[in-house]
Amino acid sequence: MREVAVVGAGMTRFGELWQSSLRDLFVEAALEALTSAGADHVDDIYVGNMSGGQFVGQEHLGPLFADHLGMAGVPVTRVESACASGGVALRAGFMAVASGMSDLVLAAGVEKMTDGADVTNVLATAADQETEAYHGITFPGLYAMIARAYLDTHAATEEDLAWVAVKNHRHGALNPKAQFQREVTLEQVMTSTMVADPLRLLHCSPVSDGAAAVLLCPLDQAKQYTDRPVKILGSGLASAPMALAAREDPAFLDAVAKSADRAYRMAGVKADDIRVAEVHDCFSIAEICCIEAIGVACRGEGAQAARVGLTALGGRIPVNTSGGLKSKGHPVGATGIAQAIEIYEQLRGEAGERQVEGARLGLTQNMGGSGASSVVHIFQGV
Amino acid sequence: MPSPRYWREVPNRYRLEAGRCAACGKVTFPARRVCPECRGTETEPMALSRTAKVVTSTVIRVPPDDFLMEAPYAMAVVETPEGARLMTQVVDCDPEAVLPGMNVALEFRLIRKEGHGGIRCYGHKAVPAG
């Protein structure tokens, strides 16, 4: 396998972008990624998207996007794994370069969620339609059940959940691309509207539009495009039973643990070596379960991490310096690529006020559904 | 939901039909072709008991369109004595009182209606039990 580097990145602002269509968002992010690397062509494109079909009635996205990028003719593949679509597209791009199939690959993710579709229903299609959605469950509902199972078995409180949102909004307030560039107080989180007990509105990531794209090439060609490439050391993907009812412990995200183990093994590093991480905080409880599953916190101790500052900027391992899905926004198919861009900027020392000093190793973790798929990547500044 | 799809799901929706793996004894609801525990492919159909215990739960306050009239409502993952788990609404009680460990009975109920002219979709809901 060839060594693979990220050599360019581009992303739109995340938010309610009324003026931009699904294809506009993709083109904006892709052009910025190409320009940042001075590239005038790509050999291959992978694009993560959860549900163009349901959100805007558009499928067959690969050729549409290549065409609008002025690259009709280039091989292009749309990748779907619900909210992990972006991360899985990155993995597909990584494999294309590592295998020698393609030299310069664009890995992108995009979602247009605010064009009028019933977002609750569309997102619920990432749950089991026959055994879960049929009975009236929603995505906040599934994560609320995970939260209640967690609170029932560990020494943790609703205030611990709220601290995740407070921390991530503090980070997001420093990110010019974030949907919510403002802080929230613990009291605001704890008194926000209940969505699905015990999860409140400010425990939930928002409905967002956005796109993100990175450019990948073999490490030995990276200097053609940038002085500071970021190497992808490891990639891990895993699945778990689709329905929450089919999992032994609803509060343990087995796919996340397996995907992290695989990525660590490929990279030859341990959880303790990671200095900055972006994890899938679609709901506050998700960040807690994910940092436990990737080994940043011990089982049962993830709930305290945000409150004590372990995962805040300045802490031992800052998590979601971008603001996370909670504050930066969560255009589902774009999220996995946007996470990679935050780590890319951190490892290049370009994260501005959010910079984690001296960070050499970073990790991204992106998951689909209520945790039935998860993909982890480990990056190293070169 | 198109009616052939609804009709296919009648055995598990109406009769709570699960499958017991002939090789390892794992009970799966609804029944599957391949056992998720041992990959055995011989399954015996069996009906689940109509009692269960709440594993985890929530109260849905922002529902999907089809359930607008019912919110807020409790939902739970419940486990039957056979070890099968299913997602279900818990009704006929204060939704906030539905918590892990609660004993419930499973009753045949109307689950949703398919618009104004569509079919009425049935299944099971849980109610508090002693």
Image: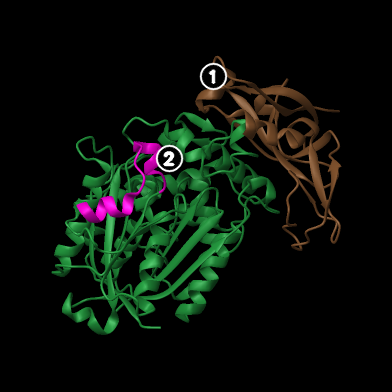
Chain colours: A green, B brown
Q: Left or right? Give the position of A107 relative to A121.
A: left
Between A302 and B116, the residue placed more toward the observer is B116
Instruction: Give the number of the disc on residue A186.
Output: 2
* Residue A370 rendering spot, x and y as whole percentages: 55, 48
Quarter occupied by residue A208: top left
Q: Residue at x 38, y 61 (%)?
A: A89
Q: Is residue A200 magenta?
A: no
Badge 1, how many Cα within 10 Å: few under 14, some, many 20+? few
Q: Residue at x 54, y 27 (%)?
A: B61
Residue farthest along the top direction in this orientation: B116
* Residue A259 rendering spot, x and y as whole percentages: 53, 66
Badge 2, how many Cα within 10 Å: few under 14, some, many 20+? some
Majority secondary structure of the magenta segment? helix
Please count the marks in the image.
2
Q: Report the magenta residues as a range.
A: A50-67
* Residue A369 rendering spot, x and y as whole percentages: 52, 48
Q: Residue at x 75, y 57 (%)?
A: B35
Q: Secondary structure at mark 1?
A: loop
Separation (CA) of disc 1 from disc 2? 41 Å
Point out the image quarter for the C terminus of chain B: top right
Quarter occupied by residue A197: top right
Eye-nearest disc, 1 or 2: 1
Between A377 and B108, the residue placed more toward the observer is B108
Q: Left or right? Give the position of A34 relative to B72.
A: left
| Chain assignment, label 2 | A
| Chain assignment, label 1 | B
Q: Residue at x 48, y 45 (%)?
A: A283
Q: Amino acid at mark 2?
A: Leu
Indicate whether A202 appears above or below A90.
above
Indicate whether B50 appears above or below A289.
above
Residue picked out by circle 1: B115
* Residue A363 rendering spot, x and y as whole percentages: 41, 67
